Amino acid sequence: MTRQGSHWDTALEWPAMPRPGSTRALLVFPRFGALSFWSLQAMCGLYAARCPAPPLGLITLAALLPADWQVRLIDRNARELSDDDIDWADLVMTGGMLPQRPDTLFVVRWAQRRGKPVVVGGPDIMSSPEAYADANFRVLGEAEGVLQLFIDAWHRGDKQGTFEKPKFSADITTSPVPRFDLLRFADYMFVGVQFSRGCPFNCEFCDIIELYGRVPRTKSTSQMLQELQSLYDAGYRGHVDFVDDNLVGNKRALKQFLPALIAWQVTRGYPFQFSTEASLNLADDPELLGMMSAANFFVIFTGIESPDTETLIQARKKQNTRRNIADSVHRINAAGMFVIAGFIIGFDSERGSVVAGMLECIQDTSIPVCMVGLLTALPHTQLSRRLEREGRLLPIEIPTITDNAGDQCTAGLNFRTARPRIDILSDYRDVLQAIYRPEAYFARVVAVSRRLRPPRLKRKLHAPTLAKVMRAFFRLAWQMSIHHPQWRAPFWRTMWLCLRQNPRALELVLIQTAFYLHLGPFASRVIVLLNRMIAEVSSAKRSERGRHSASIGRGTA
C-alpha cells in the first residue's frame, strides 16, 4: 500500500473490493485537447505534473454517492483508462465541458462496448443534452439537486433514464467535502475548491448565467473551512484555485468569509496561495482587495473582452464601461495580485480593425497573460438565441478526435459575421503576433513587476513545497536559457530588473515568466492555424467570384 501525503495513490492500488450488494462506480474525467490555452503542458513539466488541475466536479460527485458504493477515479488527462478499469465497474460515470465532448463520447462508447451502463452529467450535457442521446443515463443539472433521482432509479433496477430538476434550485450549502482522497496530488499543478455559483451580470455571450443563474449562491464559512482543512490534512500545500466564475459576485458573503479564511491561513502559516476569477469591479473595493491580499490571493482572471465601449454595451458587459480599465488592473496589482485577462474578437459592433485598440489596452494594463479568442455563440446563451432569430447561427464544429479539440482560441465564429470573416481572422492573428513576441511579453512582465506589492506574510516553511518550487525554478532557467536560447536575454533581463527594482515581486514574476513556456509556442501554433483559415476563406471567395462571373457570362450569352 502506497501513500501520497495522507491520501491513497489511486494509480497504484485501488480501494478494497466492495462488499456484496454495493455498487462499483468508475468515475472518468475526459481528456481536454492539446489545442487549448489552458493545457499548460510546458508549465506542468516544470512541476513534474501531468496536467493543471483535478476534476473538482467528479470528486464532489463521489462524495455525494451512497457510503457503501465503491468508487475509483480515472482522470484521462493524468492517467490511462484500461479495459480492466471498466470491467471492474458496475457503471461508469463521466462528463465535462464542451471542449471535452469528443473524449466524453469516446468513453461512453468504450464502456458500452464492454457492457457497462454509462451516466453522463456536467455542464456540456446541461447545455446540449441531445449530444448525449446514446448515454444510458443523463443527469441534467447540479449534482446536489438531481443526483439522488438517478441513485433511486439505479437502486430500483432502471436501465436508462434522464433526470432533471429546475435550474438554480440546488442548495450548495448541502454540498459535501470533495473526495480529495481520490487524488494523486503529484499529478497536478494546483487543486480547486468552490465558494459560489452564478454571476450577477448579464453578458450576452456567457453560458454561466444560463447554467447557474444570476443570483450567486454561496457555501457557508464553516463548509469552506472544512474543505480547506480536509485538503490540508491530506498533506496538500501550495496553489489552490477558487473555481468560482465570479468570486466577487456576492461581495457581502465573500466579506463574511474572508476574515475567517485569513485567520485560518495565519494559524497554519499560510499553507495555501489562492487564485480565482472575478469581475473587474473587484478593483472598486479597497477593503475587499485588502482582505484578498491578506488571505494570500496572488492572481485574478478577469474578462476584459474589449476596450471598445460600444462593443461592451452591445455584449451587455456594461460593468466594464464604468471604469478606466488600466487603472482598475493597476489597483489589483497594487494589492499584490497579477491579472490574467480574457479578450474576444468578432463582435458585431466592431468597426474596422480592432488591432490598435486591443494592443493599446494590453500595453496600458501591462497584462502579460492574455487569453485572446474568437467570439463563440455557446449553446442556449442570449447570443446564440439572437443569432438564431437573425438566421446567422451555424453549428459548433466539434472534432471527432480529442487531440484536435481546442477552445475559443482555436475555434469560434460559429455564425455569419457582421464584418468580413477574413478581417476578423487577420485581426486575431495580428494581435497574437504582437503580444506574444518575446520582447513584448517580457516587457509587460517587467512593467507589472514594478506595480506588484505582495503583502508581507509569515508563511511557514514547508520543505517539500520549497524543494518543488526550487526544482521548478532550475527547470525554468534551463528552458529559458538552453532549450530556448532566443528567450535567454529577455528572461535574465527581467529577472535582474525585478531583483533590482522590486524583489518582493520575484515569485509572481517567475510564475508569469513560466506561462511563456506554453504561451509562446501556443501562439505560434494558433497563428499557423489562422493563416491556414485565412487562406481557405480567401480561396473560397475567389471561387465564389469565379462562379459569379461565369453565371453572368452565361446570362449575357
Image (spheres, helix red, strand yellow):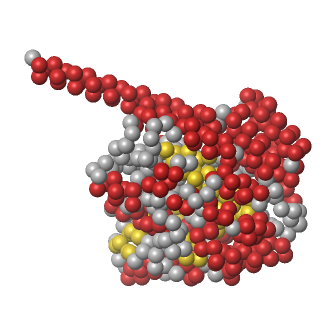
**Hey, which residue is sitting farthest left in the picture?**
557
Question: In the depicted view, which residue is nearer to us: 116 or 58?
Answer: 58
Q: Quadrant of the C terminus?
A: top left
Relative placement, left or right, of 111 versus 428 is left
Query: On the rendered image, what quadrant is the N terminus found in?
Result: bottom right
Which residue is the extreme one toward the top? 557
Horizontal and vertical percent for residue 531? 48, 30
Horizontal side of 256 relative to 381 (left or right) equals: right
Compared to residue 183, the image places residue 219 above or below, namely: below
Residue drawn at x 48%, y 50% as measured from the top left: 311
Residue shown at 79% from the left, 51% from the top: 451
Please tell me which residue lies in front, 445 or 161: 445
Viewer-nearest residue: 90 or 286: 286
The location of residue 257, given as percent across then percent down, is 69, 77
Spot occupied by residue 86 in the image (x, y as percentages of width and height): 49, 61
Of the pair 388 and 180, the residue shown nearer to us = 388
Position in image of residue 424 (x %, y %): 45, 38
- Picture residue at 54% right of the left edge, 37% below the top: 355
Does residue 202 appear to the left or right of 497 in the view shown? left
Residue 489 in sight from this viewpoint: yes
